[in-house]
Amino acid sequence: MVFGQAEDWSIYPNPAGSELQVSISNPSVEGVQIQVMDMMGRTVYTRKYDKDTYTARIELWLSPVFRTNS
């Protein structure tokens, strides 16, 4: 989330699994763009929304991330 572009926002659940919800109240004229990136910095979702208040349900198709102890 880039601060200063939306008046009020929430993202849940955190951490996300295969789905997350983003709620935004955005009174600005230009709208907002939601961009979700995976842990490698790759963009997995992007969409621009007009100004308004809304909740976006985003399904994520991510490869699992594994951590090993060496």
Image (tube, rainbow, N blue to C red):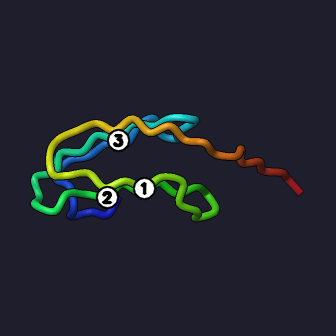
Q: Splitting the image into 4 quarters, where does residue 41 fall?
A: bottom right
Tell me the mark number nearer the camera, choosing from 1 and 3. Answer: 1
Quadrant where the C terminus is found in the figure = bottom right
Mark 1 sits on what residue?
46
Residue at 50 percent of width and 35 percent of height = 19
Q: So how many labels did they put on this image?
A: 3
Q: Are marks 1 and 3 in contact (CB under 8 Å)?
A: no
Separation of marks 2 and 3 at Cα, in angstroms: 12 Å
Residue at 42 percent of width and 55 percent of height = 46
Tell me the mark number nearer the camera, choosing from 2 and 3. Answer: 2
Q: Position of residue 18 (x, y in %)?
A: 57, 35
Q: Position of residue 24 (x, y in %)?
A: 24, 45
Q: Amino acid at mark 3?
A: Val
Mark 2 residue crowding within 10 angstroms, few (<14) / some (14–19) / many (20+): some
User: Under tag 2, what secondary structure?
Assistant: strand
Separation of marks 1 and 3 at Cα, in angstroms: 12 Å
Q: Are marks 2 and 1 in contact (CB under 8 Å)?
A: yes
Mark 3 sits on what residue?
22
Q: Amino acid at mark 1?
A: Thr
In the picture, measured across the screen, residue 29 lies left or right of residue 64, that is left
Residue at 15 percent of width and 51 percent of height = 51
Mark 1 or mark 3, which has the lower sequence index? 3
Q: Amino acid at mark 2?
A: Gln
| Up-down relation of residue 15 to residue 34 (above or below) | above
Q: Position of residue 23 (x, y in %)?
A: 28, 40
Mark 2 or mark 3, which has the lower sequence index? 3
| Up-down relation of residue 39 to residue 8 (above or below) | below
In the picture, measured across the screen, residue 52 lies left or right of residue 36, that is left
Mark 2 sits on what residue?
33
